[in-house]
Image: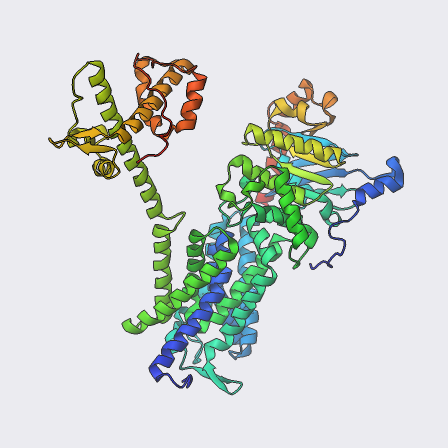
Amino acid sequence: MLQPARSDTLERPAPAAAAVASNGRDAAPAVLDVHDVTVAYHRKPVLWNVDLTIPEPRLVGIVGPNGAGKSTLIKAILGLVPMAGGRIRVYGKPFEKQRRLVGYVPQRESVDWDFPVSAFDAVLMGTYGELGWLRRPGRRQRQRAMECLEKVGISHLANRQIGQLSGGQQQRVFLARALAQQAQIYFMDEPMAGVDAATERVIFELLRELHTQGKTVLVVHHDLRTVPGYFDDVVLLNMRLVASGPVETTFTPENLRKTYGGRLSILEAAGEALQTRERSQ
Amino acid sequence: MVDWPTFLSPEARIDLWTILVGLVANTACALLGCFLVLRRMSLLGDAVSHAVLAGVAGAFLLTGSIAIGPLLIGAVAVGVLTALLTQTLSTFGRVPEDSAMGVVFTSLFALGVVLISGVEDLHLDTDCVLFGKLGFAAVYTVDVWGLRVPHAMTTLVPACALTVLFATAFWKELKIASFDPLLATSMGLSALVIHYLLMSMVAVVTVAALEAVGAIIVVAMLIVPAATAHLLTDRLNRMLLLSVAVGAISAIAGAFWARRADTNAAGMMAVVAGLQFAAAVILGPRYGLLGKWLGMLRLSVRIACEDVVAALYRREEFARQTAAAEPAPLTRAECRRAAGDGFAALLAVPRLRRRGYVEATAESRLVLTDHGRRMGQSLVRSHRLWETFLNQNFDLPPDHLHEPAERIEHYIGPELQEQLAHELARPSVDPHGKTIPPPQPETSESP
């Protein structure tokens, strides 16, 4: 479990960018390659055979109805839920070898906001990944955490306990924490759910900025109206992948109807059948 | 018997060592307890510490000795098994997690009790492992490096040291895995590994504390100081220090009272911890009930005061408009009625007099001072501005305007007042045709 301490903690060259530069465009591995991924909870599949390739840095919105498996897809990519089948590649290698290239913003409700830490402490946690086991954050990590808080416009709240922040401010803490991860590819689970308009604008500008820095961001998004304005690509998900690609060609009424129009009754029934059979055996 | 420090009487020595043993046990438990409480795993901590008994009994039956090594191995194995079984049952067995935990730990605990009942050994009887013999800590002794110390210390001190080491070394990992296990795991700091490390530590500390406090009271030492500290602070490091302090107070006061009442010392320590928890619930600075009540009372007294002042101001205004020579002053009872006749209203009039907003006339009726008149004018201005605002922006009948304005007038400061006036193009009368009084240069203070 213990990983060797790294010496190039901060000024590491982005391996992905290096790979792109040396190998040329065609040979560069895709940012993200999800191949035939199936995930089941209690033996009942919630994601069926999802194939998804993001060849180059893009802003990607993931949309779909409730229970479509949007969060589950992200969790499967990050190794947080076991996969019943399939394969994940991040910049050409398994996720386990590329952890430091990946940043994560979980759903805001997934943590206990009464937890006794300040906003600054919470952001500092973004640097824990690069430190590995047992090493403590130092001056540079602290400085970066402060910069990230500034970037999302709440450095004046650094010493506030996180429970005393508004919903929008809490979401900004999560974003600052992800920025502190200095990742190449970010996964954000509903970062704009229940935030104020000012925060939504800050998040959107941040997404744009990350994109211009050559980073990839996958965002689980709930507001269909803003999809074309916010994202380059869209992934339409409803237990299976309905469609993915550039917003202009993919975000069509036809595809939306396929995604949202009624449950996918055959997949549902197949899942139930699997579960029932498992139970009776 | 422990025969030092020699300057103390034998009785005082017994007390001292009871306290010291309790102190070490409490410290180790409180530190681990903080993470159990924050991870919402108090019950799993409870389960592990109970189930450990089966491991201890099993190890004893296998080796035939109470050497701490085998006991620890047995305990940690069963402790981890408890956490593992609970998780497996709830994941694969279609058993809800709390039931799974309830089944696993009570079964293992009962197994431990059954096994130990069959054992005849001085240090391992049912009474001892359940309730501990803290009061006799100074009696059962061993020699360590030529020094006679309580036997319980030989397990507790290393366990406590290990706990401090664990919390220090894995500080960052414990923090992130407790706050956001998903992020921690995605970073490669597996929350699951931390979880089992923590459960193993709970098992270790429980075994170490078995002789002194037993498998039942140890749960109180794990959870109560940590839960108390959680109410008192919002920083993790302070929470750990405070939980140790709560544990220390329990140890000292518990030993003292147990001696006076001639009862189980560990039990009394747990009772003291419970009292401290109750005190924190009521008196806690931020989350305490008392603070909340006082805050609410303060607010309702302020509102009552403002209601009285506004009523007096309207009275004066009415008198001016009807050209009466003197405004009819209000009696105290009328003032109280204006403020809703509650407990807050009772406090309001004396407070207004004390602060010079109103004064009593010869007939002991109340009139406004200049100071009070300024405040009344500002309040009435807020009230009528709000009525105007509601009337313009909401489609409400005129008789729906007064009540909301009556409520919100207490919260409209000079800034919002100015904003409202600006927005409404500085109206001079409200929807009911009443004059909106002009603003005051300095009216921000309130009684």
Say if A246 sits above or below B46 in the image.
Answer: above
Say if B238 sits above or below B289 in the image.
Answer: below
Find residue B395 and report its image quarter: top left
Residue A9, position as x, y percentages in the image: 73, 52
Scheme by which the image is coloured: rainbow
The residue drawn where x is 38% and y is 51% is B284
The residue drawn where x is 61% and y is 42% is A149
Left or right placement of residue A77 versus residue B224 in this view: right
Left or right placement of residue A34 versus residue B117 in this view: right
Outermost residue, bottom side: B146
Residue A50, visible in the rendered structure: no
Outermost residue, left side: B363
Residue A242, position as x, y percentages in the image: 69, 27
Foreground residue, A133 or A137? Answer: A137
Left or right placement of residue B350 versus residue A219 in this view: left
| Quarter of the rendering occupied by the C terminus of chain B | top left
Residue B375, position as x, y percentages in the image: 31, 29
The residue drawn where x is 76% and y is 46% is A94
Find residue B401 and report its image quarter: top left
Residue A95, visible in the rendered structure: yes
Foreground residue, B114 or B31? Answer: B31
